[in-house]
Image: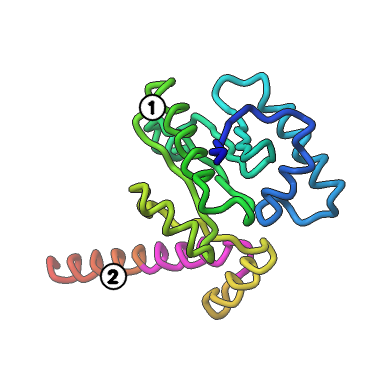
Amino acid sequence: MKRTQVSLRVASPEDAPVLAEVWSEIVRRADREQQIADLEAIIARVTPLDDERIVVAEYDGQVAGAVHLRASTLTPLNLEPVVQAISPHVLPQFRRRGVGRTLMEAAVAFAEERGIAHIATAAVSGSRDANRFMARLALGPFAVLRLAPTAMVQAKLDAQAPAGGLANGRSGTRQLTHVLAARRSTRRAQRRRISDLSS
């Protein structure tokens, strides 16, 4: 019986159509041609870089999954070096065959090559299998990434603004002005009382 192995390689521009399928839940919502064009641009940008790599996993000669690896920092404010394993994803027909494990081994090797002690990844919050897989690899929760349309966030901010407040953050300035005026008024009243007591 022939044993099938998972093999890895660096993505090339010709992989864009299949990567659009692999990352269909992750790429921006657009028509397929635009998604493919986006991935061609991403591959072209990443290819010459030393600190980024798109790794494609093949199973029995067919593309089975991919991961985008990037050496970066934990956050823009926390400069601890980290390898981000962005969207490690396996096509449904190739799951439970070691493809995901092989992609994460590529992330470990990428980190070790650079002397980086930490790996970070994210899984879609609703993907129970992906989150369980990451937990089995000791990747615990660190932060929650939340997303909403800008207009919706603005509407919620406006709805939660204090009554009589002005839009665009001016209500906070107005509130501060009132607090400072009240403090000055209190100080003047205290000075008058002290002056009345001393006379």
State the extent of the magenta-drawn residues as a range: 166-182
Q: Residue at x 60, y 50 (%)?
A: 94
Q: Quadrant of residue 112?
A: top left
Q: SS of the residue at dot 1?
A: loop
Residue closest to the eye, 167 or 18: 18
State whether the magenta stretch is mostly helix, strand or loop. Answer: helix
Gap in Å between the C-alphas at discs 1 and 2? Answer: 62 Å
61 horizontally vs 40: left or right: left
Give the percent coordinates (x, y) of residue 175.
48, 67
Q: Is residue 19 above or below residue 81?
A: below
- Mark 1 lies on residue: 116
Name the amino acid type tagged 2.
Answer: Ala
Give the percent coordinates (x, y) of residue 89.
58, 48
Q: What label does residue 189 carry, if any?
A: 2
Tag count: 2
Q: Residue at x 30, y 69 (%)?
A: 186
Q: What label does residue 45 carry, if any?
A: none
Whichever of callouts 1 and 2 sits on the residue coming sooner in the sequence is: 1
Q: Residues within 10 Å of mark 1 (few under 14, many from 20)?
A: some
101 horizontally vs 66: left or right: left
Give the percent coordinates (x, y) of residue 110.
47, 27
On whether residue 33 falls in the magenta region, the answer is no
Name the amino acid type tagged 1.
Answer: Ile
The residue furthest bottom is 163
Q: Quadrant of residue 6?
A: top right
Q: SS of the residue at dot 2?
A: helix
Q: Residue at x 68, y 48 (%)?
A: 22
The residue furthest front is 1
